[in-house]
Amino acid sequence: MGSVETNILLETGTNELEILEFVISGNSYGINVAKITELMQVQEVQEMPLAHPFVEGVFQPREEVYTIVDLAKYLGLGISENPEKDIFIITNFNQMNIAFHVHAVESIFRISWQDIEKPDSIIYGGQEGVVTGIAKVNDRIISILDFEKITFDISPDTGINLSEIKSYTGVDRENTPIVVAEDSALLRKMLTEALHTSGYMNVTVLSDGEEAWDYINKVKNEGPSLVTSKIALLITDIEMPKMDGHRLTKLVKSDPVLKDIPVIIFSSLIDENMQKKGLEVGADAQLSKPEIGGLVDVVDVMVNKI
C-alpha cells in the first residue's frame, strides 16, 4: 500500500496531530501518523519458536526485519472476517521496527490535542490502561492506543532500562525541583523511579501538557522572580491529550518569565524530523525514551546551568 503521505503540513507547536484510524473487529482505534512508516497488505510471516502469544512472527519486506504484533489478540478481540484483506501498520518508534496487524484502515484526519479526551480510568483499565485518549470524529468514537505500553507488555526490555541509572544521594539533587509531563501511567512511574534512583527526589509529575502548563503558571503567579528556583527543569513527552509537548515547550520558551527554564523533550518519536520541530519550539535537549541513562546525564548538565 506504500508509505503514509499526507498533504497536510503541520506547523510546529500548534497542538495538532494526524491520526490514522484503523479497525479491529468493528472497533475504531487510532495511532499517531508520526509513528507510521508504511501500510502494507498482510503477508505470510515466519513464526518464531517460543515467541510471545501476541507475536505472530517476523517478516522482511526489504532490508529491515519487522516483528508482527497481532493487535486483535492483544486487545482480546475477535478474528478478522476477511483475513486476506488485513493490513500491517509498519511503525518506527523507540528505535524499534514493529508491524501491527489490524483488520482494516479507514482514513487519516487532523485533530487538535485539545479535542482528545482522557479515557475514563474505570472503563479503560485504570491507571495501567492501554487507551491514552478518546477522539470523536464524525460521530465515531476512536480510542487512541498506547503503543509504548503494548510493546512493553509484550517485551519489557523495550521500556526504560532502570539498570542504566546510577544510584545517587545528595542534597544538591534532592532539592532540585523537576517537573515531568507524561500521559502514559507506565512511563510516569518509570520516569519517577529513574529520577528518584539518581537522587532527584523533588519531582512533580503531571499527566498532560495542559496540567503542566497550569502548574507552571501557578508557580509563575506566586512570584516571577522565583520561577527557576521552583522549577529547575521541565521534562516533557510529545504525545499527550489536551496539550502536546511541542506546544508546551513553545509556550514556555515564548514567555519572558519562563523562557530560562531548561526543557528536555523525552519521547518515543525522536528522529531527524522531530529534532527539527523540537528546535523550532526552543527545546534545550531531545532524547528518545530508551536513552534513560543519557536523560539523567542531560538533566545534570541542564540544572547546573541555572
Image (cartoon, helix red, strand yellow):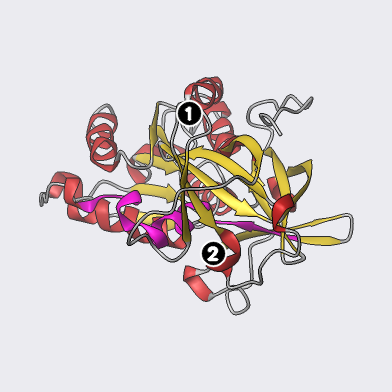
Q: Quadrant of the C terminus?
A: top left
Q: Eyeballing the image, is 237 above or below 22?
A: above
* Residue span colored magenta: 142-162
Pinpoint residue 21: horizontal percent, then vertical percent.
74, 50
Q: What distance separates the C-alpha of mark 1 from that of mark 2?
A: 34 Å
169 is higher (above) or lower (below) than 277: below
Instruction: Determine the image quadrant of residue 16.
Output: top right
Q: Amino acid at mark 1?
A: Lys
In the displayed orientation, state which residue is furthest to the bottom: 122
> Relative to 9, is 151 above or below?
below
Residue toward you, 281 or 118: 118
Task: Determine whether the residue tagged by mark 2 lies in a helix, strand or loop.
Answer: loop
Tell me: 245 left or right of 2.
left
Q: Nearer the viewer, residue 137 or 4?
A: 4
Q: Nearer the viewer, mark 1 or mark 2?
A: 2
Q: Which of the numbered marks, if any, corresponds to residue 139?
A: none
Please tell me how crowded label 1 is: few (under 14), some (14-19), or many (20+) other residues with Cα within 10 Å.
some
Outermost residue to the right: 138
7 with respect to 263 (left or right): right
The residue shown at (41%, 49%) is 180
Does the segment drawn in magenta span residue 144?
yes
Residue drawn 39% across and 62% down? 52
Give the camera-side residue of 169 and 39: 39
The residue located at (13%, 49%) in the rendering is: 171
Note whether residue 234 is visible: yes
Q: Which residue is mark 2?
A: 130
Identify the residue position indicated by label 1 in the image.
259
